[in-house]
Image (cartoon, helix red, strand yellow):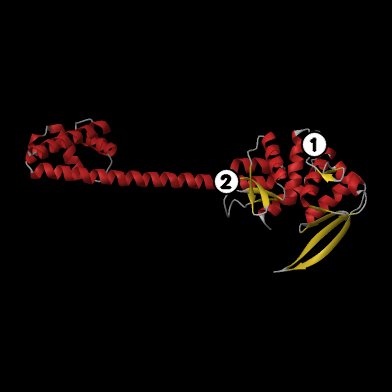
């Protein structure tokens, strides 16, 4: 079972939904899942969704959709469920705000008047045409696919009204509304009352965020170590230059202490070198003090090289 299927099955088992929200959910589902010609025909591979939509039609319109179960053979045998509504078709489509005067329309403002009704509508759309990647196997991605650009724009704006940032784009001959922000997707799953799926998503997200943070810290630590080693090697070369050219004796005692300890501990950082000197000698010094001594050494070498070439 895919993660999307788990979320959808959890949504269909939610009983905490009133009649107006059921109507809005059914409207979103019919708009995105139904084949609308002479009747309303809905095909799904998910038994829970088929049962849920059947119940909604029965409770709201007092009808019994015809159910056809077929075995489909491709890579494996699986059942598909076909719901057909052949009565009150025009009335149902108008009542669900899908059609008006035999023309497909976008939901009118009065139809989705509360945040709960908007969420229910989006829930129905998701049941019909939505997917969410399993966070344990790939990146964070939520999407809804539609055939019409105006429906993609409408959904994007509807998400915005709920303070959810979604984007839309054209992909091949279809249009996709998508979200890639992990926190936003988690909030959406929570809005759909898919509690167990929400906890699973958050557990994976927290684990991945922690792992990424640890990796960043490790990378930062490795970079700092490499920087300290590079700095130490350059300072050893400077010390060697001083000794080869008889410049070492020109240094004051405090600078000689710093250079002597750099030779003893070539791989440590300036901060660590300062701590070692302060601990093992009577000379208390900080990182900036150590750096100051090496600036003096650099300037001494520079003056010597300029004098030698003149």
**x, y percentage for residue 41?**
84, 55
The answer to which image quadrant residue 255 occupies is: top left
Query: Which residue is identified by label 2?
Result: 205
Q: Tell me which residue sits at (70%, 41%) in the image.
A: 155
Is residue 176 among the parts visible in the rendering?
yes
C-alpha span from label 1 to label 2: 37 Å
Q: Circle 2: is it few (<14), some (14-19), or many (20+) Cα within 10 Å?
A: some
- Up the image or down, 239 lies above or below 41; here it is above
Name the residue nearer the viewer: 13 or 77.
77
Q: Tell me which residue sits at (21%, 32%) in the image.
A: 292
Task: Name the element at disc 2.
Answer: helix
Q: Tell me which residue sits at (90%, 49%) in the image.
A: 89
The answer to which image quadrant residue 228 occupies is: top left
Is residue 286 among the parts visible in the rendering?
no
Of the residues tagged 1 and 2, which is closer to the observer? 1
Query: Which residue is identified by label 1?
Result: 108
Task: Indicate the quadrant containing the N terminus: top left, top right, bottom left or bottom right.
Answer: bottom right
The answer to which image quadrant residue 110 occupies is: top right
Q: Circle 1: is it few (<14), some (14-19), or many (20+) Cα within 10 Å?
A: few
Name the residue nearer the viewer: 72 or 235.
72
Name the residue nearer the viewer: 30 or 52.
30
Q: Relative to 48, is 250 on the left or the right?
A: left
Give me the disc on residue 96: none
Mark closer to the chain start, 1 or 2: 1
């Amino acid at each position: 079972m895919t993660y999307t299927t788990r979320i959808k099955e959890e949504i269909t088992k939610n009983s905490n939904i009133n009649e107006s929200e059921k109507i809005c959910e059914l409207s979103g589902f019919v708009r995105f899942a139904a084949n609308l010609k002479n009747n309303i025909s809905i095909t799904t591979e998910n038994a829970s969704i088929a049962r849920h939509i059947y119940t909604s039609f029965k409770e709201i319109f007092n009808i019994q959709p015809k159910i056809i179960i077929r075995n489909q053979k491709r890579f494996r045998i699986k059942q598909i469920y076909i719901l057909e509504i052949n009565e009150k078709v025009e009335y149902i489509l108008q009542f669900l705000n899908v059609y008006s005067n035999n023309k497909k329309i976008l939901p009118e403002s009065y139809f989705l008047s509360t945040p709960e009704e908007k969420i229910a509508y989006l829930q129905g759309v998701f049941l019909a045409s939505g997917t969410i990647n399993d966070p344990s196997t790939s990146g964070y991605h939520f999407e809804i696919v539609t055939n019409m650009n105006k429906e993609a724009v409408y959904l994007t704006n509807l998400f915005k009204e709920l303070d959810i940032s979604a984007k839309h784009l054209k992909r091949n001959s279809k249009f996709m509304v998508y979200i890639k922000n992990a926190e936003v997707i988690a909030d959406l799953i929570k809005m759909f009352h898919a509690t167990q799926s929400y906890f699973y998503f958050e557990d994976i997200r927290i684990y991945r965020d922690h792992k990424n943070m640890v990796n960043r810290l490790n990378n930062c630590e490795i970079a700092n170590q490499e920087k300290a080693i590079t700095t130490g090697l350059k300072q050893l070369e400077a010390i060697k230059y001083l000794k080869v050219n008889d410049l070492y004796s020109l240094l004051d005692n405090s600078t000689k202490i710093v250079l002597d300890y750099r030779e003893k501990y070539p791989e440590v950082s300036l901060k660590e070198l300062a701590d070692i000197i302060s601990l093992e000698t009577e000379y208390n010094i900080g990182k900036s003090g150590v750096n100051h001594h090496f600036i003096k050494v650099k300037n001494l070498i520079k003056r010597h090289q300029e004098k030698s070439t003149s």
